[in-house]
Amino acid sequence: MKISAVVLPAVAVAAIASITLAGVSSLPANPAAAAASQGSYAGKSGDEITKSLEEQGYEVRKIETEDGYLEAYALLDGKRFEIYVDPKTGNIIKIEQDD
């Protein structure tokens, strides 16, 4: 019984480590490659949305409420974006790139 008590935690640690390492190796090298996408979670508040978008490489200029949605104005790679978020779900419902 003592052997199984040691082996099972060791197996669990090895499994978690391999999952974690696999996840890290699949992350994009360029933050812009992880840009927000429609349907993905961004947050339910302005602060949460700002943090989420900044982690993806965006520079958030401002967030306003428009027609019941949170609208984030942000820059990514020199391009301007308007990102609309449903404050009830926190999901991105639309992304528009400005010219």
Image (cartoon, rainbow, N blue to C red):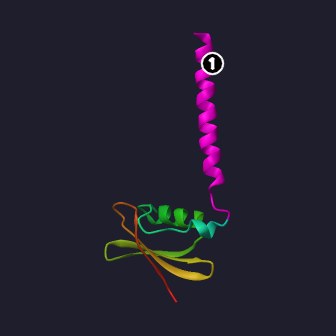
Residue type at numbered disc 1:
Val
- x, y (%) of residue 65? 38, 74
The part of the chain drawn in magenta is 1-29
**Residue at the spot 61% in from the left edge and 70% down from the top edge:** 32
**Residue at the spot 33% in from the left edge and 61% down from the top edge:** 88
**15 horizontally vs 47: left or right:** right
Secondary structure predominantly adopted by residues drawn in magenta: helix
**8 horizontally vs 83: left or right:** right
- x, y (%) of residue 89? 36, 60
- x, y (%) of residue 35? 55, 68
- In this view, which residue lies farthest toward the top? 1
Which sits in the foreground, 5 or 77?
Answer: 5
14 part of magenta stretch: yes
- x, y (%) of residue 84? 41, 73
18 part of magenta stretch: yes
- In this view, which residue lies farthest toward the right? 29
- Residue bearing mark 1: 6
- In this view, which residue lies farthest toward the bottom? 99
Q: Is residue 20 above or below residue 32?
A: above
**Residue at the spot 50% in from the left edge and 76% down from the top edge:** 62
Quadrant of the image containing the N terminus: top right
**51 horizontally vs 92: left or right:** right
